């Protein structure tokens, strides 16, 4: 069997509007940072029926939703003074499938059934789709998501002494679907159609 790096090397690629390579994988553009983790998760992750999977395109309210769901799910585990959200980011409390759980689904806190992903529905590991776990999806007006993503990545690029593309150029690429886990509308529609089934 070919290695993930060999498979990735055969995928269509292009420069993203934020500098890195992005790869067309299963109909969606996936960043260098996420693609191998997504492939590993598809192969290795084993969902439990008690899992609650928070799904979203990037910059659609994921941080907010992670905080809310973590607070609800763990409300009887922590009191107001011991809740980890007081001292940690919600990203530290809710593992990301493509990063934190890509190698194995066993390194999870058994008291926390939450996990998150930016993967489109069609790219979720089969164990999630075939299990009876809950999927919570959040979406946002695409214009708001684009503006939030643009400013987030512009700050990131500035921290690396890189210049972001012109807003108009980034907007055209976003509309063409060339953004993290884009095209945006295909991401939203995949989960919406799955909810109808």
Image (cartoon, rainbow, N blue to C red):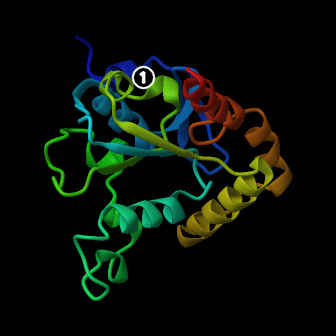
Residue 146: x, y in percent?
73, 52
Q: Is residue 37 left or right of residue 124?
A: left
Disc 1 residue crowd, few under 14, some 14–19, many 20+, Cα 10 Å: few
User: Which residue appears at 33% of the width and 61% of the height?
Assistant: 73
The answer to whether residue 187 of the structure is visible from this angle is yes
User: Which residue appears at 38% of the width and 69% of the height?
Assistant: 71
Residue 82: x, y in percent?
24, 83
Of residue 42 and residue 13, the one placed in the foreground of this image is 42
User: Which residue appears at 86% of the width and 51% of the height?
Assistant: 168
Q: Which of the 4 image quadrants contains residue 134?
A: top left
Of residue 23 and residue 94, the one placed in the foreground of this image is 94
The total number of labels drawn is 1
Q: Which of the 4 image quadrants contains residue 66?
A: bottom left
Specify the farthest residue to the right.
Answer: 168
The answer to whether residue 162 of the structure is visible from this angle is no
Residue 1: x, y in percent?
22, 10
Specify the farthest residue to the top.
Answer: 1
* Residue located beneath label 1 in the image: 9
Of residue 68 and residue 163, the one placed in the foreground of this image is 68
Q: Circle 1 sits in a helix, a strand or a loop, which is it? A: helix
User: Which residue appears at 76% of the width and 51% of the height?
Assistant: 141
């Amino acid at each position: 069997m070919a290695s993930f790096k060999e498979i990735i090397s055969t995928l269509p690629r292009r420069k993203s509007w934020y500098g890195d390579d992005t790869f067309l994988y299963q109909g969606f553009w996936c960043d260098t940072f996420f693609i191998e983790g997504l492939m590993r998760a598809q192969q290795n992750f084993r969902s439990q029926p008690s899992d609650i999977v928070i799904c979203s395109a990037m910059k659609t309210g994921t941080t907010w939703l992670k905080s809310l769901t973590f607070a609800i799910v763990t409300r009887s585990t922590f009191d107001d003074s011991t809740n980890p959200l007081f001292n940690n980011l919600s990203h530290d409390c809710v593992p990301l499938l493509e990063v934190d759980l890509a190698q194995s689904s066993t390194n999870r806190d058994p008291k926390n059934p939450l996990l998150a992903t930016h993967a489109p529905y069609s790219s979720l590991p089969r164990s999630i789709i075939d299990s009876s776990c809950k999927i919570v999806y959040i979406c946002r007006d695409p214009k708001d998501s684009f503006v939030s993503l643009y400013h987030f990545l512009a700050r990131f690029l500035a921290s690396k002494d890189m210049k972001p593309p012109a807003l108009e150029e980034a907007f055209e690429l976003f509309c063409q679907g060339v953004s993290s886990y884009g095209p945006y509308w295909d991401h939203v529609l995949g989960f919406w159609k799955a909810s109808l089934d």
